[in-house]
Amino acid sequence: MGLDIGVGVGASAVPQPNEPVLTLDDDAYYWFMWPLFESLYASTGQIIDLYGAASFSGSDLALVQAMLVDARNAVLQQPAQWEVCVGLPLVSRQTRTRKKAQFEKRFATATKEHFLTILDQWDQIVLRARELQQAVVCFGD
């Protein structure tokens, strides 16, 4: 499952294949940015989701760019690699007398170098969308 981010044309939420595209997966990079996606949603009404679609154009592109600046600043404060919580699956634990279900945090590793590459690619997508006067679209599967 992936989230494709690229330049959209018209009402389509699918990135154009002849333009730069970035794919985010259900991993440390996506989940590290989740609080920023929620803030962007509060401003635009559009959520960047692994299973949904969003489109940002006009003045919303400036909000996406600001989110990317915030993400870059947060990443630059991290060590070369760090752990990010990527989920809270419900697991079953056996005690002496019964089974007990509880949530258990699941973590994945992010690296600063790769994260900055992702943000550079996303910046290029925003710049290209502005150049073409089109939208940045996010299309999850």
Image (cartoon, helix red, strand yellow):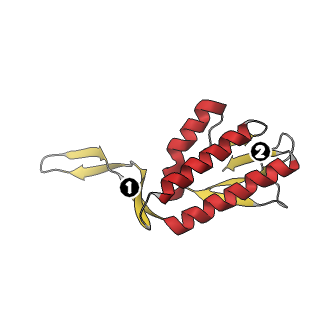
Q: On the image, numbered disc 1 is attached to which residue?
A: 106
Residue 32 rendering spot, x and y as whole percentages: 49, 52
Residue 27 visible in image: no
Q: On the image, numbered disc 2 is attached to which residue?
A: 13
Residue type marked 1: Arg
Considering depth in this image, is 101 or 47 the residue closer to the camera?
47
Mark drawn on residue 136 = none
Residue 15 rendering spot, x and y as whole percentages: 78, 52
Query: Given the current orientation, which residue lies at the most extreme left position?
Result: 96
Q: At 58% from the left edge and 63% from the top edge, which residue is drawn?
A: 116
Of mark 1 and mark 2, the one earlier in the sequence is 2
Q: At 41% from the left edge and 64% from the top edge, which residue is drawn?
A: 79
Check disc 2: other Cα within 10 Å, few if <14, some if 14-19, many if 20+: many
Could you tell me which secondary element the residue under label 1 belongs to?
strand
Q: At 74% from the left edge and 51% from the top edge, which residue is drawn?
A: 126
Lateral position of residue 80 relative to residue 92, left or right? right
Lateral position of residue 43 relative to residue 96, left or right? right
